[in-house]
């Protein structure tokens, strides 16, 4: 027999109490004087033994009760064979999460971190199952638990250390929160595949730069049994300043390059210089205190030198000290005008189109008459066609434009020109008459959910009632929308005509119908002065540019692209369309036969990328994300505010201590199954009952 809590045997010393009480003899206290004895001298009784136990049985019962009670608290149990704990019961799950973002490119930070991780891995006990993951913009398994499950413990550890040395920092930004959440989920999935749960933890090896994205942690409840131990990577110098390009607003005629210099909050340097990476470039000095930023103009580019890279000098870490800049030539757009007016005729519709499109700061728009466009040329791909009084000779150009997905605007000044324009667009089923307008009409009931009028949905732009329309056309025979009226025979499969706006007399003002892959937009009133005041309103330029963007014009790339972003391919001309393109990377590598159906996503480093499609090549500058320059580390309090259970570095667990603890747990389980203490407590109760009965008998026998 053994016991779990042997210290409770000290309670057995309490049996000395009854023994002492039994040996202690008290002298009588009460005295009653008698008058007959007042003349006698006092003579107390003479005792032969000062300490004598009179009731041995009663003493034994009392001491036995105390001894049994102490015995019960020791939790005794009968010895039984106990199986030694297997090694699987002491196994641990450890996920090593290594930061490979661009901020880890600082001086000496990566080498020191890999060395420390390698030393820690060598000290782990063999029963620890380690999974290796890296993260930057994405979480990437390097050696996950599923792959290591089939390997021997020694082979697992060797594989982890080999792949750890093969890692290297990338140029992508840091998504710390998403990486931690996905790693915690991976550990929980690994637990569900085990017969017995194992202890789990995460090693987070990172510089914890404050620019890391932590949004994913804010809505995630971190598990209580998953501690995170931070292995902080520290750079040789905290001084770091970053350089970023400020987005240009081409719509506001802003084509000036501006850059932003950001200094880290723990930086020790404040004076920096800016120059072009080209011979003969001048320098601009900039003073940026720690934790602040400055926006400035770079120095003028050297004459006769193609400079595409700006350099920042003066801090100790140069991974974010360069930005790439490409020139943004105006996109060329061709608008074909089908009408008799000249460009200087103030009474015609072309004059107002010329005035609106010539003011564009984003596109170089060329408005040409249909007679000046070579319709047989393969590269004659208009962005927009406007039909006012078209000639039948333009039908091949219109058909080809609509089949390529373009847009045609019909804004004829009379019913005959409207019918001719609609016939060239494939609609001969409509009837057009001149509307009877008493004074003027106003436009209302506009469908702001449609893509053409969507920019006008805000309340400050949605009021068109100030525009006067002196006359307009009425169109009959439109295909009704589904549910309005029953379609005519043979037109069940024809798409309905959409009425985008109406006049106050409930007649259509703007109509759209599809043709082939393109669209035809009908204005039942023109914008020339004889028809309306539309061309003189503030709504006209905005609507014309919207229609131009909705047509088949080539979309401009975004000004600033970051490492890891996907880039849309340039749009090839219809006559030279292809399913593949090529890309020239900053490293000099050429990628061919790239599918155009998916954006180009191999932007793995900063630099200039050239994307080519048949008939068009576009150069895009890809730069480092601005948040990577915020290299001051997050504090422990900030991490704990996200709910993380942080833990300091632990000493290696002694396997013998683990086995002793497991053996103790098995003894506790055995004692709980035997429950000898309950039988002992029953014996204590019986002894106390016998002691009570015997004590009552002895008291009743004493003389009164």
Image (cartoon, rainbow, N blue to C red):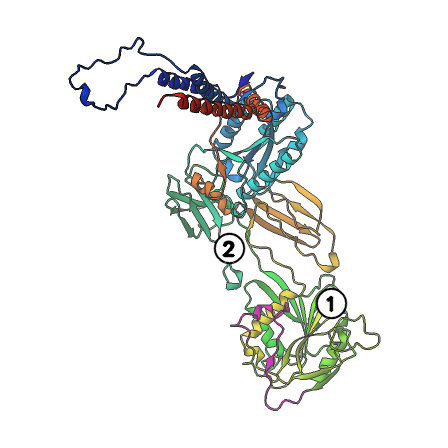
Residue named by callout 1: 402
Q: Which residue is drawn at 63% across and 52% down?
A: 618
Q: Quadrant of residue 421?
A: bottom right
Q: Where is residue 81 in the image (x, y as percent from the top left)?
A: 63, 17
119 left or right, relative to 704: right
**230 sits left or right of 149 in the view:** left
Name of the residue lying farthest toward the front: 36
Drawn side of residue 144 relative to residue 205, left or right: right
Q: Measuring from the top left, give residue 622's x and y in whole percent.
A: 56, 47
Mark yes or no: residue 102 visible. Answer: yes
Towards the viewer: 443 or 42:
42
Q: Where is residue 65 in the image (x, y as percent from the top left)?
A: 46, 21
Q: Is mark 2 on a helix, strand or loop?
A: loop
Quarter of the image with the N terminus in it? top right
In reply to whether residue 193 is colored magenta, the answer given is no
Residue 355 in sight in this render: no
Residue that mark 2 sits on: 247
* Relative height, residue 157 to residue 181 (above, below): above
* Residue found at the far left of this picture: 39
Q: In this view, does 212 lie above or below 59?
A: below
Q: Decide: marks 1, 2 in contact (CB < 8 A)?
A: no
The stretch in magenta equals 435-462
| Nearer the observer, 30 or 435 | 30
Q: Which mark is residue 285?
A: none
Majority secondary structure of magenta residues: loop
Q: Where is residue 664 in the image (x, y as percent from the top left)?
A: 55, 22
Residue at (84% x, 74% y) in the render: 490
| Residue under the image location 61 percent in, 21 percent down | 85
């Amino acid at each position: 027999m053994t016991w779990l809590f042997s210290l409770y045997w000290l309670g057995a010393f309490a049996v000395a109490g009854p023994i002492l009480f039994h040996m202690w003899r008290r002298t009588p206290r009460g005295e009653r004087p008698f008058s007959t004895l007042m003349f006698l001298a006092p003579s107390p009784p003479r005792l032969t033994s000062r300490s004598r136990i009179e009731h041995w049985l009663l003493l034994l019962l009392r001491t036995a009760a105390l001894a049994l009670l102490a015995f019960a608290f020791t939790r005794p149990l009968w010895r039984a064979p106990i199986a030694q704990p297997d090694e699987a019961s002491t196994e641990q799950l450890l996920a090593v999460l290594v930061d490979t973002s661009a901020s880890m490119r600082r001086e000496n930070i990566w080498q020191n971190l890999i060395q420390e991780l390698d030393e820690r891995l060598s000290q782990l006990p063999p029963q620890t199952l380690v999974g290796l993951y890296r993260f930057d913009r994405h979480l990437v398994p390097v050696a996950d638990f599923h792959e290591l499950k089939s390997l021997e413990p020694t082979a697992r550890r060797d594989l982890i250390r080999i792949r750890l040395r093969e890692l290297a920092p990338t140029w992508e930004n840091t998504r710390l929160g998403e990486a931690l959440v996905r790693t915690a989920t991976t550990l929980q999935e690994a637990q569900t595949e085990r017969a017995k749960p194992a202890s789990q933890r995460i090693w987070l090896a990172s510089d914890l730069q404050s620019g890391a994205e932590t949004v994913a942690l804010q809505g995630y409840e971190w598990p209580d049994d998953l501690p995170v131990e931070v292995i902080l990577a520290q750079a040789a110098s905290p001084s770091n300043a970053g350089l970023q390009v400020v987005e240009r607003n081409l719509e506001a005629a802003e084509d000036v390059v501006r850059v932003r210099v950001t200094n880290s909050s723990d930086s020790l340097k404040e004076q920096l210089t800016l120059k072009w990476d080209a011979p003969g470039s001048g320098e601009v000095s900039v003073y940026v205190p720690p934790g602040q930023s400055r926006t400035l103009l770079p120095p003028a580019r050297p004459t006769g030198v193609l400079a595409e890279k700006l350099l920042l000098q003066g801090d100790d870490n140069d991974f974010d000290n360069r930005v790439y800049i490409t020139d943004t030539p105006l996109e060329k757009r061709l608008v074909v005008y089908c009408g008799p007016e000249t460009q200087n005729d103030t009474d015609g519709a072309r004059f107002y189109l010329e005035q609106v499109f010539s003011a564009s700061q984003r596109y170089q728009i060329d408005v040409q008459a249909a007679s000046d466009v070579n319709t047989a040329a393969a590269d004659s791909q208009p962005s927009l066609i406007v039909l006012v009084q078209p000639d039948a000779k333009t039908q091949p150009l219109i058909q080809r434009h609509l089949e390529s997905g373009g847009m045609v605007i019909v804004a004829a000044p009379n019913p005959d020109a409207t019918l001719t324009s609609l016939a060239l667009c494939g609609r001969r089923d409509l009837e057009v008459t001149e509307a009877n307008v008493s004074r003027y009409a106003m436009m209302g009931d506009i469908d702001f959910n449609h893509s053409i009028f969507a920019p006008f949905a805000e309340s400050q732009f949605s009021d068109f009632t100030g525009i006067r329309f002196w006359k307009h056309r009425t169109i009959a025979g439109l295909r009704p929308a589904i549910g309005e009226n029953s379609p005519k025979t043979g037109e069940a499969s024809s798409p309905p005509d959409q009425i985008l706006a109406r006049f106050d007399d409930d007649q259509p003002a703007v109509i759209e119908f599809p043709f082939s892959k393109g669209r035809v937009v009908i204005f039942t009133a023109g914008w020339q002065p004889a028809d309306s005041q539309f061309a003189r309103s503030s709504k006209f330029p905005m609507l014309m540019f919207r229609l131009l963007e909705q047509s088949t014009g080539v979309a401009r790339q975004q000004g600033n692209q970051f490492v890891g972003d996907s880039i849309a391919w340039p749009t090839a001309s219809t006559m030279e369309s292809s399913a593949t393109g090529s890309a020239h990377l900053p490293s000099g590598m050429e990628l061919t036969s790239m599918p155009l159906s998916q954006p180009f996503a191999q932007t793995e480093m900063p630099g200039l990328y050239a994307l080519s499609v048949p008939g068009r090549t576009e150069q895009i500058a890809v730069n480092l994300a601005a948040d990577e320059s915020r290299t001051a580390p997050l504090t422990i309090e900030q991490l704990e505010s996200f709910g993380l259970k942080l833990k300091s570095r632990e000493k290696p667990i002694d396997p013998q201590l683990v086995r002793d603890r497991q053996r103790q747990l098995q003894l506790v389980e055995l004692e709980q199954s035997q429950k000898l203490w309950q039988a002992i407590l029953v014996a204590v109760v019986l002894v106390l009952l016998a002691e009570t009965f015997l004590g009552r008998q002895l008291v009743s026998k004493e003389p009164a």
